[in-house]
Image (cartoon, coloured by chain):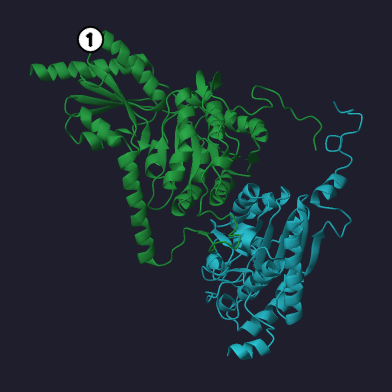
Amino acid sequence: MCAHVPRCGHYGGEVEDMAEKVLMKGNEALAESAMRAGCRFFFGYPITPQTELAAYMAKRMPYVGGTYLQAESEIAAINMVYGAAAAGARVMTSSSSPGVSLKSEGISYMAGADLPGLIINVQRGGPGLGGIQPSQSDYWQATRAMGHGDFHCIVFAPSTVQEMCDLAYGAFDIADKYRNPVMILADGMLGQMMEPVELPKMIDPKTLPEKDWATTGHGDKREHNVINSLYLTADHLEKLNQARFEKYARVEAEEQRSESYLCDDADIIVVAFGASSRVARSAVNTAREQGIKVGLFRPITLWPFPKVALEETCSHAKAYLSVEMNMGQMIDDVKLVVAGRAPVEFYGRTGGVIPTPNEVLTKIKEMQASLIGKAGE
Amino acid sequence: MAETTKEMKVVFERPHALLPVVTNYCPGCTHGIVNRLVAEVIDELGVEGKTVGIAPVGCSVMAYDFFACDMIEAAHGRAPAVATAVKRVHPDNVVFAYQGDGDLASIGMAETVHAATRGENITVIFINNAIYGMTGGQMAPTSLPNQITQTSPYGRDVSKAGYPVRVCELLSTLDGVAYLERVTVDTPKSVRNAKKAIRKAFDTQIAKKGYSLVEVVSTCPTNWGLTPSEAFAWMRENMLPYYPLGVYKDVVADGYANAAEAALDRAKDCPLVVPSEEGSNS
C-alpha cells in the first residue's frame, strides 16, 4: 500500500544458500542463522536491546518467503509462536528480560503441549523495567522458572557471535527432537557487538520432516490431532508430567555442552557463561601469565547444566569462582555439582555493569593467596 | 434393521464434524447448539479436513474433544493470536476460534482487537452469556448493569465496575473487519438465522475477504440460577435490548470486494495510503 518501502541493505534481494563469512552483530547473526535453519515465522514485540534482531527479520523475511509479524504484545507474540508451532512450523520470537517475563505463560503452555520453538532473551538489567545495559540476571528464570508448572526449557548460552549463529542454527533441531521450547540466553553485549561469522547453509523448510502430530488439518487421512495442555484428571496429568521428565532425563544425558579452557591442571576453576565468560577468559589468561593455575569452565547449556564435565574438575580443583553479571545465580548450580568438596566463591556486577578482567583477576589472586595460606597452615 | 434404514430417508443426523461424544455442557446451555451449527457449516462446506479450531479457556475449553477437525486448546484470551499464526502458516486452512465473553472481551481484548485490525482471515464465534460460566458465575465484561453475579453480589455497579462491552459495535470501527453479526439461538427461527451468519462468516474467510465474527447472545441457566426457558426469557428481556441483534459490518453488502478495499476507500484522502500515479509524495 505504501509507495516507498525500503528494500535495500545487505542481504537485499537474493536468498543465500551457500555458507559464507561476514561481519555481523550478534542479534543479526541469531536472526540470519535461524532463517537458514528453516525458520520462516517470527513473531515479536519491540524491546531494547534485541531491536536489531526483529528489524533484521522484518527486512529479510519477505525475501525468503517468510512471515515477520509485529504482535500487539509479548503475550500475543508467544501465543503466535504457540500457534505456528502447533501448525508444524519452525518458529521463533525474541525479546529482552521484561518481555520474556510476559512470555512465560505462553512458554509454559508450549511445554505443556509439547511444542517446539525458539525463544531468544537478549538480557538487560532488572528487576522491573530495570535498565537497558547487558545483564545475566535471568539465569534463574531461564533455568528454574520459565513459567508455572513442572517443566524445563532447554537453555543455550552463546559467548561469541559465531556461537550465537551456531546455536540458533541447531536450536530448531533440538526443539523438534524433544518437542520442547528452547531458549537462547544472550545479553545486550553479545547482541550488539560485531564479529566475523561464518554463516551456515540455507535449509529449505519444505525439505524438513513432516510433523505427524501437528494441527494442519487432518485432510480426511487421519484422526484429528489435538494440541492441548489441559488434563482435569490428576492421575492423567501426573503420568504425563512423569513422562515429560523421562524426556528431560534424556536431554540431561545427551545434550550437556560446555567448554573447558585450561582446566586440566587448574587449582582454581572460574565458571562463567556468555558475556561474563569473555571477561573471565581474559582474567584467566593474565593469571596464567602470572603463574596462577587457573582455568575457565564455560557452560554452553545452562539447562541441562553441564554437570558431568564440571564434575570431572572436582578431582583436582581446590576452589571455584562463579563470575556472573548478576547478584549470584548460576553459583547455585556450581555448588550443587561441587557439593561441598571445595569452596565456591562469587564475583559479579549487576544492573547492567560489566565486570572488568582486572576485577576478576583481583578476585582470582585473593583466592590464590587464600589457597597458599591454607597450604602453609 | 439395514432394510429399514434403506427405506427410510435420513432427515436429521449428527454432523460429521461433531464427534460422537457426550459434551460437558450443562443442561439448557446454548454451547451445544452453537457447536452443532459450526459443525453443520463445516460439513456443508466440506472443509473438515482443512479446518483447525481453537478453543481457549472457558466452558468451551474442551471443544477439542467435541469437534472432529484438528483442534488447539489455547491460553485464556489468546485464541486470536494462536489462530493468526495457524492461518499464517497454512493460509488455505479454515481457522476458527470459539470464545466466551470473559475470554474474548476481558483477558483477550488486546488479541481480539489486534487480530481484527490486522484483518486476519479467521472466523471467531463469540458466545456472550454475560457471565463467567466455568469458574462459577463471576461478573463478565458483558454482564449487564445491575446484573447480580458471584462477584457483583449487589448487582453490577457501573460507577465502580464500569459498563458492559458491546463487542460487535466496538469491532465495527476497525478496518480489517469484513463481517460482523450478532445473533441468538433462542428459537428455531433464530437458530436458522445464526447458522446462516456462521456460514457467511466461514464463507468470508474462505473468500479471503478479512476478519469475521459472529456474536451469539447466549444463556447460562446454571449460573443465572434459572431454568433453560426462564433463561431465554431473561435473555430476551434484558440482553437483547443492550445487545441488539443484526449485522454490524458487511463490507460486501457495502459494495466492496473485501475489507482491504473498504479500508482503502475510507482512507482515500491520505496521500501516503493512496499514492498518486505521478508519485508526488516522493
Asked whether, in this view, residue A86 is left or right of residue A137, the answer is right
Left or right: where does residue B127 sit relative to residue A283? right
Judging depth in this view, the residue of B1 and B235 nearest the camera is B1
Residue B193: x and y in percent read 77, 73
Position of residue A71 measured from the top left corner of the image (x, y, whole percent): 63, 43
Q: How many numbered discs, if any?
A: 1
Kindly identify which chain the residue marked by label 1 belongs to: A
Q: Name the residue under label 1.
A: A291
- Mark 1: few/some/many CA within 10 Å (<14, 14-19, 20+): few
Residue A125 seen from this side:
no
For residue A167, side relative to residue B177 (left or right): left
Q: The cyan chain is which one?
A: B
In this view, the residue in front, B266 or B262, is B262
Pick out the residue farthest to the right: B278
Q: In the figure, residue B235 lies in which quadrant? A: bottom right
Q: Could one spot residue A15 in this view of the protein?
A: yes
Q: In which quarter of the image is residue A351?
A: top left
In this rendered view, identify the residue nearer to me: A365 or A156. Answer: A156
Look at 43% across and 44% down and name the residue there: A177
Asked whether, in this view, residue B254 is left or right of residue B85, the answer is right
**Image coordinates for residue A377, horizontal then vertical, percent:** 7, 19
Vertical relation: A256 (above or below) B124: above
Seen in the picture, residue B94 relative to B16 is either above or below; the reply is above
- Residue sitting at 47 percent across and 54 percent down? A113
Q: What element carries label 1?
A: loop
Q: Which chain is painted in green?
A: A
Q: Which amino acid does label 1 sit on?
A: Gly
Name the residue nearer the viewer: B100 or A170: A170
